[in-house]
Amino acid sequence: MKVTESSRKKNLWYWVIFAVGMCVVFALGLLAASITERRAEVASIYNNKKVAIEGIEPRAEKWALNYPREYDTWQRTQNMDFKSKHLGNQFEDVLAQRPEMVILWAGYAFAKDYNAPRGHMYTITDTRQTLRTGTPEKPEDGPQPATCWTCKSPDVPRMMQEIGVENFYKSKWGEMGPQIVNPLGCADCHDPATMNLTITRPALREAFARQGIDIAKASPQEMRSLVCAQCHVEYYFKGDGKYLTFPWDKGFSMEQMEQYYDEVQYTDWVHALSKAPMLKAQHPDYELFKMGPHGQRGLACADCHMPYKAEGAFKYSDHQVMSPLANISGTCQTCHRDSEENLRNYVYGYQDKILEVRNRVEKELAKAHLLAQKAWEHNATEQEMQDSLKLIRQAQWRWDFGVASHGASFHAPVETQRILSQSLDKALQAQLALQKVLYAHNVLDPELPDVSSKEKAQAYIGLDMEKERAAKQQWLEKTIPAWIEEAQKNNRI
């Protein structure tokens, strides 16, 4: 039988199809074997845990036995080797860089000490060492409530569980010193049984509940921001019990929070120079992030500050929480197809423009406080000063809202620029109103003090910083070893 050319070609195609099919089967077999091997590798670590973690375990070292990769990156939050154009994770004395802030916070503890934030490993150390927490000989003498510890340690939810939330807030900062000893870590955000993200502090749940929102129904992606929102938000201490409260009842915007504070007649302190009833913004990072382009598009805090890493079969979040600019290839470039240099310069462009307004605001707002002081010294009446003090309160609330959130100029550049522009406008309006008051009292050219350095500004508002620092150092040397010894004795660290 004669084989035709057509038959030969047909047979050749059969063999080609057969060969391709075998290659596909072989490749699928390799893929299946790889998947099975990797699943087994993951299961060997995450399903066969070395230790069982139950309840609130504040010691991150215990978690490290089961989750060594996450723990290793968390430990790196103690590194202080990154500096961008305007900030980083290094120690920086902000008052020395911007002395007008001493005047803005006259009569408030922030005028003594305000440093740039460092990594999570320093939450306990920095809280103990800052001059703002005072030097209480006895816990009941301390100037700060235990509420100040709330966002600093996984020992906080442990103590809330032991003594109750209200009793924790009612306690004094010094009283909780021997209890709050572990820096922010695993138990702050994770359920030890499932490793799911979880909310460990009640204020966030309570704030959403008052808006009719049950965050227990939040998606996993939403939780990757909400665990951060337990702390990186605006808050205040409500009532004599110093109950931690988020002022979100009317909404998340700067104006809505201001309206809330005005209606409940809340004041953080009365300014030592101007006598204005002041508001101190904390760090409304979550609120501003939600108003910016990334938050509006559904990104989470962790997408940029805790990007995923791959190591063999493992994909896990990098727990070295820090600026995305330290790792542009692993953060920005996962979405943006542009060079590292261009992406970095885009951020710096936002920051440069916003900080230009910020610097102007601080000078004009400090001047407003000083003019108000002069007006009081020349016998201005409360009625004459009423409008000026209201403008100062409004101007400083806007300034603080825009600068207390260190990432605001990137998280929500348009909103931050709007807020700071309003602050500048109100600060200048306050100056005009005060000039009218001074003119009515025959003060045409008031002489203002030289507050061009931190030292000059602190001396002007009556702070003896050498005495403050010496007292703090003596207190640290006497108190902290005793706290640590007690914590070790009770197996807390």
Image (cartoon, rainbow, N blue to C red):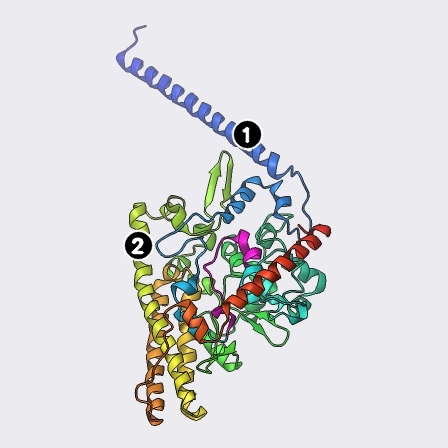
Which secondary structure lies at badge 1? Answer: helix
- Looking at the image, residue 89 sits to the left or right of residue 448; the answer is right
Tell me the amino acid under the disc marked 1.
Glu
Residue ID for mark 1:
37
Q: Residue at x 42, y 25 (%)?
A: 24
Tell me the amino acid under the disc marked 2.
Tyr
Q: Which residue is drawn at 71% across and 64% down?
A: 163
Is residue 424 at least partly visible in the picture? yes
- Distance, label 2 to label 1, CA atoms, is 43 Å
Q: Which residue is drawn at 30% across and 89% down?
A: 444
Which secondary structure lies at badge 2? Answer: helix
What span is in magenta? 108-126
Mark 2–mark 1 CB contact (< 8 Å): no
Q: Position of residue 30 (x, y in %)?
A: 48, 26
Q: Which quadrant is home to the N terminus?
A: top left
Residue ID for mark 2:
346
In the rendered image, the vertical position of residue 184 relative to residue 32, given as above or below: below
In the rendered image, the vertical position of residue 347 relative to residue 254, given as above or below: above
Q: Nearer the viewer, mark 2 or mark 1?
A: 2
Query: Which residue, as the protein is rendered here, is positioned at the far right?
Result: 490
Q: Position of residue 454 (x, y in %)?
A: 42, 67
Q: Which residue is drawn at 30% across and 52% down?
A: 345
Q: Where is residue 119 in the image (x, y as percent from the top left)?
A: 50, 53
Q: Nearer the viewer, residue 46 or 143?
A: 143
Q: Position of residue 271 (x, y in %)?
A: 47, 79
